[in-house]
Amino acid sequence: MSISTASSMTKLRTVGDVISANPPKFIPRLEAPRYSGHRSDETSRVGLAVESMKRHMSNEGYEIFQGLMSSGYVLCGRNLPVDETSVPMILKRMNPSIVVVQDEREWDVRHGDFRDASARFYGIEELAKQQDIFKLTILKDAHQRNAYHSDSAARMGCHSWIIYYHPRIVAHLAPFVRPEHIIRTWHSLDSNLVPEWGKVQRRDWTMLSGAVSSAYPLRRRLFQHARDLPSCSALRHPGYHMRGSNTPAFLGTLPAYKVSICTSSVYGYALRKIVESTACGCIVITDLPTDEVMPEIENWIDSELFKLPTGGRASKCGNIVRISPDISIPDLAQLIRELYANWNDEQQRHWAEKAKAFYDFRAVGKRLADDIEVMRRKFCA
């Protein structure tokens, strides 16, 4: 890639920058509930899941439980293998040693919500009474509804949280969590849904997609200037719904593109589309913090730091090209043109295979199940 001699450089973000830009929240940290750890390792492991989430606009909320199920968890809930929503009845029937509960907002359905009201779990408080069951819940959007999620975790006697994003950022945005009791997982995909390599004609095109809101200032600015970027398709968010997942269609669209712009929001979140775009062969441009490293699809040994014509700065590491949220449109346009010129079929296929292997929901589920067991044994100790 060409390197200019511009003297001023736009700063790339770090996790520390994200934390500094988001004011602290004042909500008490939850005390760790007791855990006796007396139940046998031979007892069942259970996921309280929401089956209808596989028909949500984006299906990752169900995919995480599919991954756990592929690693031996039994899924309980409406229209699941154990078709039951009474938590006391589930505990009596399954006698579990571990229970993973889907984010309560996904089944605590209010009037007018698009979610499935029949998926509601009843008697979640029963979990807190069972000190010999290890309890976890999923915390996805840590910046939202702190009091709600804190109360939910307290009522179920939550020992640990499963998170998708950088632990330091999550602990800052949701200060009720105990940093030593969070388990990091990653957004996943179904590698079987990724189109066969070479089936779609790839062009010098760029994909820009997603919701446009105050949480995505860079994305909002890029949508406004999409016509000034080389061959850029601006795909707007389809809205949240339960009419069937848009994920397969999105995966089917990406292989026609060489570049995918995946902004990470003011919260510096490593979003699913980074994984999806890589698996489909696109080079990813993102404002993800430099110290939020994506396993397998980054290679710091071959990292490349370069400047852009009007003073912008970018860093290419593996398949990830990091830019500043303040990058100028001319700089980004030039960066995209250089990425088109340097796009390499063999190299992109290498990163695609890496992404499919590491982020496939079965592989992610196996690592998560193992990490849960490590955390459970830590509590026992």
Image: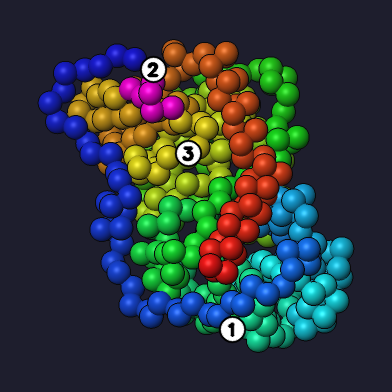
Q: Quadrant of the N terminus?
A: top left
Q: Which residue is mark 2?
A: 338
Neighbor class of circle 3 (other Cα within 10 Å; few <14, some 14-19, many 20+) is: some
Q: Is residue 192 left or right of residue 348?
A: right
Q: Identity of the amino acid at label 3?
A: Met
Point out the stretch of residues depicted in magenta: 299-304
Q: Looking at the picture, does residue 149 appear above or below residue 143?
A: below
Q: Is residue 111 above or below residue 184?
A: below
How many residues crowd mark 2 within 10 Å: few (<14), some (14–19), many (20+)?
Answer: few
Q: Amino acid at mark 2?
A: Glu
Compute the Cα span from label 2 to label 3.
23 Å
Of labels 1 and 2, earlier in sequence is: 1
User: SS class of the residue under badge 1?
Assistant: helix
Which amino acid type is marked by label 1?
Arg
* Residue drawn at x 44%, y 69% as measured from the top left: 178
Q: Is residue 261 left or right of residue 372?
A: left
Residue 155: assigned label: 1
Mark positioned earlier in the residue sequence (2 or 3) = 3
- Is 300 in front, or is 319? 300
User: Mark 2: which secondary structure?
Assistant: helix
Residue 370 placement (x, y as % from top left)? 63, 52
- Disc 1 versus disc 2: nearer the observer: 1
Query: Hey, which quadrant is residue 12 in on the image?
Result: top left
Percent x, y of residue 289:
35, 44
